Image: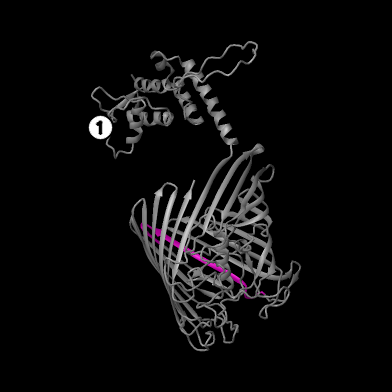
Amino acid sequence: MKRFLPYLGAALATLSLTWAIQAQAQNPMPFPDVPQDHWAYQAVTDLQQKGILIGYPDGRFNGQRVLTRYEFAVALKRALDTIKATPGEKGDKGDKGPQGDKGDKGDQGEQGPAGPSGLSDQQIQELGKLTDEFKNELAGLGVNVKAANQRLDELARNVAAINNRLDKMIQFNGDFFSGFRSNLSRFAFNDYSGAVQGPNNSLVTNVQTPSDFHLEARANLPGNVKFLGDLVASNYASYRSSMLTGTLFGGPSTANANGFPTEVFVNQAQLTIPISHLGQNAQLIVGRFKNEVTPMTYWRPDTDAYFDLPWYDDGNFVQDGIKITSKFGNATTSFWGGSYTGLTTTLAGDVINRPFVGATNGPRFLNPGAPIDYPVPFTQGAGIANQSVGGHIEFPLWHYATLGATLIDFSAAQAPLGAPGVPAGGFPAFENVVVYGANATLKPFGHLSGNAEISKSVTQQHLDQGDGSKNLDNAAYNLNLGYATGPINVQAGYQYIDPNFGAPGYWNKIGNWYNPTNIRGPHVRVAYDVNPKIQVHVGGDVLEGARNRSIAFIGGGNGGFSIQDNINRITGGVSWKPCRFATFSADYEGVFWDLSAGSSATAAGAHPQQQYINLGVGLNLSGNTVVKMGYQIGALQNGAGFGGYGAGGDTSNFNVFTTQVAVHF
């Protein structure tokens, strides 16, 4: 007979068609000539368990031997025999008689026939093609090819019906998070997230216990419309909101030891509707949906440095409104309009989901007497957005790069630090902010990669009325270039942020200072894989003031940040994964300020410092459950540079212990 396929190739081809067929009640010994570390071991063993491959009389597989058409037809026949025959059609029913009394429960009957195969539509089609190809050989083996094809057709209809029912069913999944945090410090301090924490003399007292539960529902509706809903029961949202208040405004944190009471709210409720005749793959999203664009135009900051919640840390703001996405030629577009005021909590307000826009003029050094020992963004004049309307377009530049452009208009309310309509700290009031920018991403070119972004924020009293600002110090840009070869990955770049740049994005974090403004300088990051289990990384930023600013802070003094001032940041760490179930890490960050006499709060040269050591353990208890533990040692030194201090004096030391459990189901 004509030779057809190597035996191993036939085994894998048949496997792809019979993977889900129920195994027969047998447990033969594995083929001794197929080692367990061979890439095809599992495939051959599964087929052996199903009775598709039986090997040779000596018990060996002989995978190197060439397979004939006849031998392949025998294996194919065995596969077809595992597909149960379709029951014959039932006869006509007679007239239905009167219903009788309910009888006693009978004995349990015999086990019914096996259910339909788990084959996919594509696998059934391939099995049909093989049946046609080997119809002569199968007929010689006594197979009724016509009946076999009828069984395959019936099986295909059953699979299609099952898939149709499954598509119409609502699918539920969810995420659960529970966190535990305790601090150890003699005095009040600002933590790694920038929030104010009170003194605590033991790691086992005053434990903070935020929690978060999401129940997500997805459904396919008629007309190919899709529904997505996310119902949340959480006190983490209010816990994080209070951290935002301390971080962005420099005010006292409102978080208590156990967070706020749990609240229930809808985080997402959207319909995705396909649109015809509007470009390619056009969709209309209506309801409460997530939205983000680029880090320097529209990207929600991750302001919690201690807990990891991917469903909050994805950069998305939640909006009530509409969004249209489409593709015209090679250009991908999105346009939206929506409000942020609907997603609020009664206990913590809506700070977690409201973009901050407008001037920041940072950093600002706070008033004496407050337990603050670091600079925070100067938020006087900043606004909280209520609504936004915007668009983004992205298109390829041949095969080398992708270019994008963004334009967003925000309606904003004056921040709490300034009364509505009254200039705050001598800066003009505004009720409208326009953010626009451009971005480019270099497609991988050999070992090289890169991206660049530039953005500008313009404050206005109203949409059609300026606020008198010259708008000469409200731009920002970020350049990055990467080089990867073997185990080494190097990233280098340059960042420039004007003092009055105020887009709702997330572009940097220096110590516990989020989204720093009035800075410029290069940065570098290097990662090296020592081996598959150990990775190390180092990095640094060398920054200085972008423009000269001298701002009097509350209580007297100079404050501000100027070209003569410098910030040096050093990072490093190691990660060890001894097995797939556990990961250990150790990281360090040091931030070293060099303030001139004109910028320090004491009118003298100063050298404040922030240093953090972070130790972490991650455990994958199962495929959907992760436990993380962390321990942080922090040391903050004023160096006679900042203005606000409590009882801690010039130095503040603290320890933070955290544990979190996250489950996805």
Three-letter amino acid code at the position of disc 1 = Asp
Q: Nearer the viewer, residue 14 or 494?
A: 14
Measured as percent of width and height from the top left, residue 392 is found at 63, 57
Which residue lies at the image location 48% right of the left edge and 24% below the top edge? 128
- Rendered residue at 43%/21% (across/down): 80
> Which region shows up in magenta?
471-489
Look at the picture and state if 496 lies above or below 595.
above
Q: Residue 475, image x and y in percent?
A: 61, 71
Q: Is residue 119 above or below residue 230?
A: above
Which residue is rendered at x = 58% and y = 36% of the image? Answer: 167
Q: Is residue 300 visible?
A: no
Tell me: 427 left or right of 151.
Answer: right
For residue 273, above or below residue 213: above
Q: Is residue 222 left or right of residue 485?
A: right
Quarter of the figure that contains the N terminus: top left
Q: Main secondary structure of the magenta part?
A: strand
**Quadrant of the rendered structure where residue 456 is?**
bottom right
Query: As rendered, which of 360 and 123 lies closer to the eye?
Result: 360
Q: Position of residue 205 (x, y in %)?
A: 44, 66
View extreme (left): residue: 58
- Is residue 555 in sight in this rendering? yes
Which quarter of the picture shows residue 172? top right
Badge 1: residue crowd in 10 Å (few <14, some 14–19, many ≥20): few
Q: Mark 1 sits on what residue?
A: 33
Instruction: Give residue 305's position: percent from left, percent from top.
Output: 48, 64
Residue 473 covered by magenta stretch: yes
